[in-house]
Image: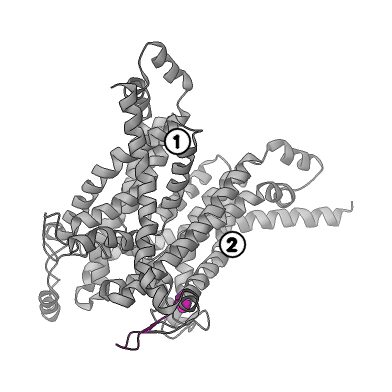
Amino acid sequence: MNDRIYRILLFAAALVMPLVCGGVVYALVTDAREAFEHFGFFNFLTSSEWSYTEGAEQYGALPFITGTLMTTLLALIFCIPFSLPVALFVGEYFKGTRVAAILSTITDLLAGIPSIIYGLWGFYTLRPLIIMLDISPQGSGVLIASLVLAIMIVPYAASLSAEFIKMVPNDLKEAAYSLGATRAEVIRRVVFPVAGSGIFSAYILAIGRALGETMTVTMLIGNTNNIPNSITSTGNSMASIIANQFGEADDLRLSSLIAIGLILYLITAVINMIGKIMIKRARIV
Amino acid sequence: MDNANIKNRLTKDRIVLYAVSLFAGLMAVPLLAILGEVLLRGYEQLSWSFFTEPTPTAYRAMKAIKAGEPIPGGIANGIVGTMLMLAMAALFAVPIGILCGVFLAENPKNRFSQFVSFLTDLLQGTPSVIIGIVVYIWVVVPMKGYSAIAGSVALSIMMLPLIIRSTEETLRILPASLKEAGLALGGNRARVMLRVQLPAAFGGIFTGVLLAVSRVIGETAPLMFTALGCSFIRFAVDKPISAVPLLIWEFFNDPNLQELIWGASLFLLLFVLTLNLTAKYLAKKWNQ
């Protein structure tokens, strides 16, 4: 093969990426326009009405934006007490040992489980438990969706945090030990400050995962088109309203769902970009 | 420093160690719970016919339940659909992904390749449900119907970034002397890539492909708007087709078919986890 053909071939393959990504944005924007033009962009974002009575159709994204933000935020809160210990266990306390390898395999396997199976487990195992403990009468809702979501994002947050914890230079830690610090103190005073921005970026990327997670939330959140007024009430996330209604929707409702898709896409894209930029910065330091 | 203070600090140190170990160890609970539930409940449903027969109609299933018999049929339509769509998706995503990864590894500093690299991150972070919507607009609407092609386009778009990244990263960690030796022997860049670098990077790229497959095989949301589902075994690429995760979703929503959920989940889970573990094992082996 001659060099020129080789270069052209590679360039052509690389051109696929801008085409795909451009195509994604173009398709979403063109098909969401009808909804934005009909309701007005700002109005669509802030309206909490979702009714498809013919002639008086009214669609707004606020309940679903709220649902997504609530589930994501709660999932993040539930995830930290587990992902941080996992990261410390693998990256600091038992770095390079067999137990750490086993724990890494466990979290890797958790990351591999398809989201629909997480949904089934939440529905058939966790939901009866929540009903039994009398936390909420119907079981499904924001709380259970966030709980399962938290388990799903632990592997992502933990493995990336562990990577940054491992990179903390030994001489810094040894300096602290030589001053008489205990291990817990070294972690608090040396490891966290040095690895902090990296750990932070790991959680940003975990948020990016949780925002777009579809099947688990669809199976657990209860699928009601209202703004959830407490963590045990039911609702819908942006992804779950799309999963629920896309197949049966047409015209204005379809366009509204695509508009919600566009908003979700933009939010995840911004979050992911912030995460990636922070990781790059944290790696240089 | 007085003794009590030191003791206090040492106790605190211990408590932190125990708490970290306890909470980290707790992550085994959901994994074991999920594996246990799917294994125990799914095991009963597995039989030869579960893999060779298509999904029964809700009516047939209802009759069987009323008669107190096990539900007839299985998930063969889903297995065929999943395999067909994966094969078609890989046919597109593997060559394009590898070429794109080679491009990124060959031109690390070029503006355009930095842009492509940025887009790869962007695409990797895109929620799968969005990919479903977009492929619906791209393929399902113009073709005037759901199809296996649409499903495989969605899967291949999700595979692309993973294959690109693994190719690029594996090529980057190869020793530069390998490439230089090839070039010194008079090979041009294409020949050196094809005969020296790619064969040396095969392990890493293969692992990347396996991981990409294991990631998309359980995807449900994008297939709901593209492949739709189908209750019999079909090989046509321009017609709606089923997939194992789609079947699980169907069983979840149809009270008559609920008995079949666990068998289908067991199949999917074992498939995904085996692929995952194989990929990790191969990666380790090739790295040595």
Q: Is residue A123 visible?
A: no
Work out which residue is located at the far front of the displayed protein and give it. Answer: A37
Give the answer, above or below, for where B222 lies relative to A256: above
Residue A72 coordinates in the image, percent (x, y): 51, 67
Q: Which mark is residue A81?
A: 2
Residue A17 coordinates in the image, percent (x, y): 38, 45
Magenta stretch in the rendered image: A51-64
Q: Which mark is residue B169?
A: 1
Residue A124 coordinates in the image, percent (x, y): 35, 73
Q: Is residue B245 visible?
A: yes
Subunit that carries the residue with mark 1: B
Q: Is residue A222 left or right of residue B135?
A: right
Q: Disc 2 residue type?
A: Pro
Marks 2 and 1, how far apart at CA:
32 Å
Residue B115 coordinates in the image, percent (x, y): 47, 43
Q: Residues within 10 Å of mark 2 (few under 14, many from 20)?
A: some
B143 in magenta: no
Q: Nearer the viewer, residue A87 or B191?
A: B191
Secondary structure at badge 1 equals: helix
